[in-house]
Image (cartoon, helix red, strand yellow):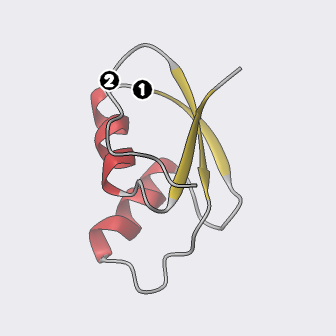
Amino acid sequence: MTTPKNIQPSDKKLEITQIKGIIGAKQNQKDCLRSLGLKHIGDSVVRTADAVTAGMINTVSHLVKVEEAK
């Protein structure tokens, strides 16, 4: 399941998990994943949903799964 392109900036904490590989992805998408701290399929990070993070998630929404952190 991929993430829809509608992540809005807020104060929520998001758990971002990489679910697909970057082979064949555009360079800007690879850069976004690295900036989020994701290197491999299955890697997860917790980030605040600020404007920068929301923009990066929307760029690579087809490669990541986003859930609200607990």
Percent across and percent down for residue 59 are: 31, 54
For marks 1 and 2 on the same chain, the one whose residue lies earlier in the sequence: 2
Say whether marks 1 and 2 touch (CB < 8 Å).
Answer: yes
Residue in view at x 38 percent, y 78 percent = 25
Q: Quadrant of residue 4?
A: top left
Q: Is residue 17 above or below residue 10?
A: below
Q: Secondary structure at mark 2?
A: loop
For the N terminus, give its image quadrant. bottom right
Residue in view at x 30 percent, y 36 percent = 52
Image-based side of 35 in relation to 52, left or right:
right
* Circle on res. 49: 1
Percent across and percent down for residue 23 are: 48, 84
* Circle on res. 9: 2
Q: Secondary structure at mark 1?
A: loop
Percent across and percent down for residue 30 are: 40, 69
Q: Is residue 27 above or below residue 4?
A: below
